Every structure is written in C-alpha cells, then in structure tokens.
Image (spheres, rainbow, N blue to C red):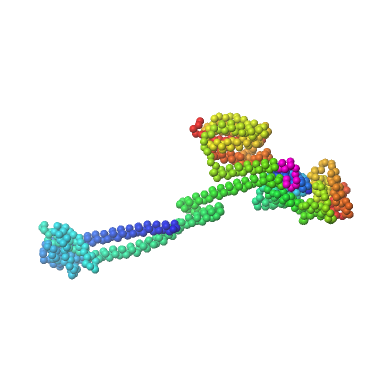
Amino acid sequence: MSLRVRLTLWYGTALASVLVVFGVILYGALAKALKEQADRSLEETAAVAERSLEEHRFGPFLLYEDLSQDFPELATLDKFFQIFGPTGQITIQSPNIKSREIPLSRTAFEAALAGQTTFESIRFSGEPPIRLISVPVRHGGTLVNIVRVGTSLQPLEETLHRLLIILLITVPLALLASLGGGWFLAGRALRPVEAITQAAERIAGGDLTQRLSVSMAQDEIGRLAGTFNAMIGRLEASFQQVRQFTSDASHELRTPLTVLKGETELALRRPRSADDYRLVLVSSLEEVDRMSRIVDELLFLSRADLGEIKMESRPVRLDHLFDDLKRQAEVLGHEQAVHIVIGLSEPVTIAGDDMRLRELLLNLLDNAIKYSPQGGRVEMSLVKQDSAARLSVADQGIGMSREEQTHIFDRFYRTDAARAHTKKGTGLGLAICKWIVDAHHGTIDVQSEPGKGSVFTVTLPLLASSD
Amino acid sequence: MRILVVEDEVKVGSFIRRALEEESYAVDLCADGPGGLELARDSHYDLIILDVMLPGMSGLQILETLRKEKLKTPVLIVTARAQLDQRVKGLDAGADDYLTKPFAIEELLARVRALLRRGTGEGMGLLQIEDLILNPATREVTRGGQRIELTSKEYALLEYFMRNAGRVLTRPVIAEHVWNLDFDTFTNVIDVYVNYLRNKIDRGRERKLIHTVRGSGYVLKGE
C-alpha cells in the first residue's frame, strides 16, 4: 500500500473518530439541555398553578376558568395541568388535555404525601412522550393538592431528530471531503520524495552529475534532498579519484611493458649471440621487478583507500625499530658505499602498528640511499619533543625545489632530477609513507634544497602513559 | 636515411635505435626536450621520432616550435597516453603519425617507411628509376628483373639516392644522411661506396644511373 494511501487512511480514521465523538457529545449535550429546559419550564408553570390555588384559598370546588382567569399564563398551548385533591382524585384539569386520561401515578402520589416533587415521563403508543411534574401543595401542614403540569416532548424530539439527520449527513460528507483534500495534500507533500526517487534511479543508472533542486531547505524533505546531494557529491568525487588513480597506474605500467615488448621483439628479429640474449633477459627481469613493485604498492594504496588495511595499535619502541632498520639500510646502501648513522636516539614508545612503521622507515631510508651520491651519508635521528616523537632521515642527495616539495607526497610524482637519477623509483613510496603517518595520527614533512640533500621529518604522538 | 629519436626512457630509446640501425638507418638519440629541439633545428633529418612526455619540455611543445619555424620533416609521435583527445592534440600540433606505447617494432618500422615515402613524395611502396626497382619493405633490389645483392651500407646509400632521385647530393649531405657523420672527418668512404654501388648497379649495363657531378657530388637519374 502506498505511503499516500496509508497517510490518507490514517488521517481519515482519526478524523472519523473525532467527528463521531464530537457528534455524540453534541447530541447528548443538546438532549440534556433541552430536557432540563423542559423541566424548568414545567416547574415554573407548576409554581404559577400553586400560587393561583393559594389565591383561591384552596377551595375544593374551584373550576379551571377561575384559575385561568386570574393567571392567564396557565392557559398556554404547549402545557396542560391537572390539580388533584389530597386523595389523588382529579379536581381540575386544563382543557387542552382533551380526552386523555392521565391519572396520578402511585409513585407521584406517595412522593407527594412525603412532600416531594416528582418528574415523570409517560408515553402513549403512537405518540411522542409527555413530561410530567407533580408538585405537592401543603397548607397548614397537610397536603391539600397535588399540582401536575405536563408538556409534550414532541418539539424536543423533533429537534433532536433533526440534529441527528444533520449529523448523519454532514459527518460522512465532511469525512469524504477531508479524505479527498488529504489525499491531494499528501500527494503534494510526497512529490519531492518522488523527485528524489527518480533522481536516485538516474544515478543508479550511472549519471553521478545529477543533483536535486532543494527549494524548501527547512523541512524534512528539504533536508533529505540536501543530504542526498552531499552524498552524491562525495560519491562522484571518490569515483573521480579512483578513475584518476587507475589512469595514472596504467600509464605507469606502460613504460616497463614497452621496454619488455620492444627489447624482446628486437632480440627475436634475427639470430643473436648468447650474450645478447642474456642481456635482454637481464633487462627484462629488471622491468618485471619494476612492474612487480608498482603493482604491490598500487595494491597497498588501493586497499588503503578502501579502508581495508587494518592497523594495529600496540606499544612500539621506536628506538628499537631504529636499530633494526639501520642494519637493513646498511645492506641496501652497501653497493653505493652510502653509510648510515644514527645521530640521536632515546627510548620512545608510541601506539602503532609495528609492521607499518617499519615500512615507513624503510621507505624513507630507501629513498635516502637511492638518491644519495656515491659514498654519501644518511643520518637517522629520534627525539622526544613535547608530547610527540620526532624522527627524521637526512641525506646528502639530489634534493628538491620548494615547488617540488609541495607535490612530493602525491601519487606517482617523481621529480625530473629523480627520474634522471634512477629508473628504479615508482613515485608511490612517499605516498605510502604519508598514508602510514596519517593512519598513526602524525605528520610528515620535508626540508630540502636542490643538490644539497633532503631531511624528511615524521612527528607521531607518544603513547599516553609513557613519559 | 637519417632519423632523430627523442625519448627519455633509456631502454626504450636504446631498442628503437638498434632496431632502426639494423634496418640501415642512421640514428641520433636524445633523452631530453631542449636537446632534441636543438638537434632537430641544427641538423637535417629525414624523420623525427618524438616522445611526448619529456623532461624539460613536452614533445608537443617541441613539435609546435618546429612547425612554426617551417620545418617540414615528418614527425612520428610516440607516447603512453592513448586517449582520443591526446592523439588529436598530437596530430593537430603538426605530427604526421602517432604510435601508442607499448608498440610492436614491426609496426614502428612500417610507419617509418610510410612516412619516409611521404616525405619524398611517393605514393607506392616501390622506388623505381627506369628498370632499377627497390622494395623498401623487403629490401629487395632488382634491375632488369635481376636480383642485386647489396650490403647494408650499400642498400642504405642506394635507398637515399633513389628517394632523392634527380637531385644532386653533395658529399656532406650523403655523409649526414647515410653515415650519420657531421662531415668533419676527411674520409673518402662515400666515394668508395658509390663505387661499390656503381659496380653492382651500373656495371655491364647500357644505361648508367649514378652520375658524378664535378665539383658538387653525385646524382642518380635516368639519362
């Protein structure tokens, strides 16, 4: 069942209940009020009759005309009255009672003897009910008369009946009109939802440039549209990022592939010497290794982008890491006669992932060695500063300009000098370093001058309890 | 034929050069933009193979500059970027053809041949003067239906002559385009090889094709 139908039905049910309750209360209240009014009126007429009897000294042989002459208000058309003697026998009755017999009821008589007024309703078949009041008249301590006034309840009944008809007609009509109006209004209120659904369908179909027009920005639907737009914007940006990354990646792989293909095809064009073949194979292996590295690093970065890399958070002693990695770096630097020294070191503990921190440090050291001159020097240092650990790797290598420093952590970025210096770099090492540093809530930056070397500094928050 | 290759990837430039040299082309290799531009301006090349991504200056910039300077040498652009807009940009900048990496060597060589044909105003594949026929694709040379065997250098020299048939070619020019020499060296290797060619092509035939132009150089033409 659609939301629109549901809303309209709920609303209709609520309204119907309210209208019914209202109708019932209205009817009941009016009925009560009208009845009370009739009773008050009877009381007044009874009082008049009582007074008139007093005037005539309660004489037993009074006639109707005597009373009505002095008290014209007794001769009203809508009421009749009866006067009973102390034994309950009728003595006077107004002419408008006509031929009907309305004797005094036992209840009224006994109540009158006790000095109490009684209200009664009686009904003759086929006729509207009659309301009666029976009032005892006492004189000198004894009951002398019982005055009875009656009135037809027909007007009252007719009024109530008419009200009932009106209610029975108007309530359903009002309900239908409201349902119709409610249906229409629900449709209008839900129209933005329909617009959002359609836009979402277009986006599911692949068009991420769609946005919703947010006209009423303040209500629930407006906020929904706004949030939706923001979400699509983020999706589009991240798709764009992936697209860019994939394009950069495939571009980077083309060069090693070109070398492999070209050198191999060339070698196969005519018979070559064993040495020539050997050289081609050695070169091919280099390219294969290069592509392997690119693929590994790309895989890491793409998993990192998707949030799939789980970082542990355990206490890690950075100074111990330093010692381990110095040994590893010495092996790496052996070929170029680059020597590695640890300048400053102190016991420093941070919360982090041991494996990733090793990768970080190794990447920095590898870079330092790669771009160092023969016989150059690479210096590592580790200090505590305020509540952070600062480690740095300094080399005397090719360095980079201020402009290049702003891009150096970008993916696939290699400076011209770097490319000229060696083919081995992938441009991803520092991007990976940055990712690891960010994941540890730290910062990384570089100070460098072209030709004079570089210093990479990483700042990481200390483990809270250690100090 | 003399070809300039401007490519910064060492291994790629290297195998392109070797492949071309094995096909008897004379090759100069340059690994950066500004250097390539200078070489293209100062020396005569029959074809330039240009990589787009170069340090210092992009290949397209070099190309635009050369075309502005009215250089008519055919240019073959080589690059890793394969998208349509890149190819269009390259061709509009003045390139005569476009190859994307990675490419097959055979395709590179075929396109080189095609561009060289165009450069000398030929439509068909075969080069022909009278009954001397040279097929660049197969490197077959025949005269009067008879197969003529030539060494690599002889072939290169003959191809150059035939592509410039009717034009007087001076020694320095021949040295540049066939031997890749900037003619400082005093050598008569050119004369020696012209002689070899004459022996193989003109000897024993009525109509001589290779003529000496006294004081200038040589020319290949029908009489």
Among all residues in the image, which is located at the extreme front? Answer: A274
Residue displayed at 81% across by 45% down: B175
Residue displayed at 19% across by 66% down: A80
Residue B57 occupies quadrant: top right
The relative height of residue A313 versus residue A99 in the rendered view (above or below) is above
| Left or right, residue B113 beside residue A26 | right
Of residues A140 and A104, the one drawn nearer to the viewer in this rendering? A104
Quadrant that contains the C terminus of chain B: bottom right
Residue A207 occupies quadrant: bottom right
> Is residue A43 at all visible to an observer of this figure?
no
Span of residues in magenta: A266-280
Q: Position of residue A4 (x, y in %)?
A: 44, 58
Query: How many numbered marks appear?
Result: 0
| Left or right, residue A178 beside residue B86 | left
Of residues B193 and B74, the one drawn nearer to the viewer in this rendering? B193
Which SS type dominates the magenta stretch?
Answer: helix
> Is residue A148 at all visible to an observer of this figure?
yes
Among all residues in the image, which is located at the extreme bottom? Answer: A99
User: Is residue B40 highlighted in magenta?
Assistant: no
Q: Position of residue B222 (x, y in %)?
A: 85, 54
Residue displayed at 85% across by 47% down: B196
The relative height of residue B108 versus residue A35 in the rendered view (above or below) is above
Residue displayed at 54% across by 37% down: A353
Q: Position of residue A66 (x, y in %)?
A: 14, 66
Q: Position of residue B84 (x, y in %)?
A: 65, 52
| Left or right, residue A205 beside residue B158 | left
